[in-house]
Image (cartoon, grey):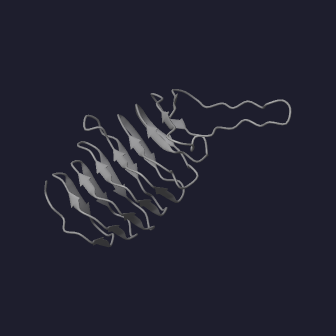
Amino acid sequence: SSSLIFTGAIVFTTCTGTSSPSLDAHTNSNTVNYHAAGVQTCLVTQYQNLTFSNTSAKTCAPTSPTLGNVSLAGTASWTLSNIQTISGTLTVGDGASAATLTTANFTFNVTGTTLVAASSNFTHSGNAAVTLTGNVTVTGTMSGTGTGAITAKADVIGTGVITFSTASQSFTEQMQTA
């Protein structure tokens, strides 16, 4: 298990010989944390565990699927820029700051649990489908103005705000307040 934290721009220089620069971020329980205090672009690769933290927008189009967990912390924000499947847990926010995940126009699937922490936002703004297979806990805000269907296949609980103005929602299990 390894962790790699990027606090600035990511630069892979040209290698000499027959090798090329690469990053194996999808093996075992590796975690990559994009932690710059500002806008940051991540490497396009497959990740085991991926964290966006500190502040500002993180531009990232990881190769799907992310095999483990994805976390947003601090006031970091991530707007999807490709189809994405998270096989582990999605955590939006740390309960202290306002992290934001926006699905945009890309299909988004979470097969593990989803947590939207206090002060944080999960926003569905596009025309593609969102499927949340595991339990969903919302103590922050989950909202949508997108036209793509949102499907929750397990319990949706919490004391947060859930508001969808135009999207089609399907909740297989009963919505509950924690």
Asked which quadrant contains residue 120, the reply is: top left
Residue at x 39% of width, y 49% of height: 101
In this view, 97 is above or below 168: above
Residue at x 34% of width, y 45% of height: 92
User: Residue 46: x and y, percent?
Assistant: 58, 48
Which one is in front, 56 or 153? Answer: 153
Answer left or right for 6 relative to 176: right
User: Residue 87: x and y, percent?
Assistant: 45, 55
User: Residue 50: x and y, percent?
Assistant: 47, 42
Which one is in front, 127 or 72? Answer: 72
What residue occupies the far right of the structure in this picture? 17
Answer left or right for 95 relative to 167: left
Asked which quadrant contains residue 108, the reply is: bottom left
Which one is in front, 26 or 94? Answer: 26
Residue at x 61% of width, y 46% of height: 45
User: Residue 8: x and y, percent?
Assistant: 54, 27
In this view, 17 is above or below 136: above
